[in-house]
Image: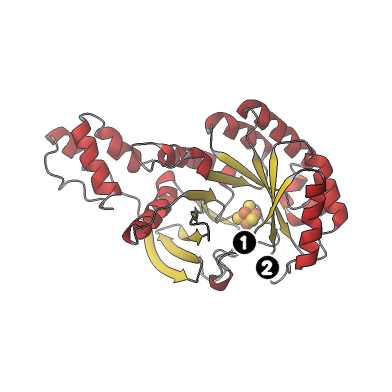
Amino acid sequence: MYFFRPALALARNPTAARQKIHYRIFQEFSFELSSIAGLGQQVKAALAHLHPPLLQHCKTETDRQSEKYLFHLPGKGNIEAVLLQHQTGRKTLCVSTQVGCGVGCVFCATGRLGLKANLCADEILLQVFHAQKILRQRGERLTNVVFMGMGEPFHNYQAVIDALQVLADDSCFSLSRRRVTVSTAGIPQRIRDFACDAPGFSLAVSVHAARDDIRNQLVPLNRRFPLQELVSALKDYWEITGGLTVMLEFTLVAGVNDSPELAQAAAALFAGLPVHVNLIPSNDTLYPPSDDPQVRAFAQVFRDHQIAVTVRHRLGDGIAAACGQLAASHKV
Ligand code: SF4
């Protein structure tokens, strides 16, 4: 954490200085702090030692409901963030936490890259800053952030926790904790840690299949942390958080994980627990999406077990910005 929090912490006293620095960063969207009038010499000298992260915005691609921002990180590679504009007015930014990813989910373009580098907290935060700046110019504002871009957030755990704290800090990004969601492929100990280290933030888990033999094929991490361990960690999570609802993600691939029997297995595993199931048809050419009737039948099984379920529409397909497509079209 090199810039956002220290910049504002330096100016916590006096309040007038804090307001000036906050205004320069979050209203004028500038990192040029040394020219702010009326700051004391000590604050100015300390600010001069802070360096904003070198995350360079290279390119924006847009379709009707989404925008994809490509950034270059010197020495690390390229990452992408995606702004999803929902019909309800919600504006959600999907951020990356790593360059590439080591988890290797079979239907994910990022997974095929392998892990290249971890982002620092400021490199995560700068993606949010960039989207806020663009939305502000349009008279709009960012409402939600999801850590579902490139990378497994819990494989870059401390940077993610640091970034979350700054996102929710009233003197920084001031986002509501429950509107910030971290999504994991399922690392049991980190789920428990997250419950303690990030109270109030939302958690999503990519389940994809509730049978180990199928999940082993889709999410190789399952061979190390099978479903039983995942569910055990989630039970600890609920114990610690007082039963916060966890989003369970199922990317549905035709003929692979979309049978009613697999929906029954998932419903049996999670019935009576505080979960909300999201079904998302795959967008990978090698792993084609389930068709609408199959998705509807899959969803009905959860409803029959009184489990909340939503079928998500894929935003961003037109610009290769849907989940799992990031970095597919750019050399990293
Ligand atoms: S889906 Fe997420 S965890 Fe799986 S390989 Fe892709 S980026 Fe990594």
Q: Residues within 10 Å of mark 2 (few under 14, many from 20)?
A: some
How far is disc 1 from disc 2 in space, using C-alphas? 8 Å
On residue 103, the disc is: none
Picture coordinates of residue 67, whole percent (x, y): 47, 65
Looking at this view, is 58 or 8 the one in front?
A: 8
Would the CB of label 1 be found within 8 Å of ligand 1? yes
| Residue picked out by circle 2 | 284
Is 311 positioned to the left or the right of 131 in the image?
A: right
- Secondary-structure class at tag 1: loop
On residue 324, the disc is: 1
Instruction: Tell me: residue 121, above or below residue 80.
Output: above
Is 14 positioned to the left or the right of 300 in the image?
A: left
Q: Is residue 257 visible?
A: no
Q: Is residue 262 visible?
A: yes
> Which amino acid is tagged 1?
Gly
Q: Quadrant of residue 7?
A: top left
Residue pictured at 31% horizontal, 49% vertical? 52
Q: Quadrant of residue 194?
A: top right
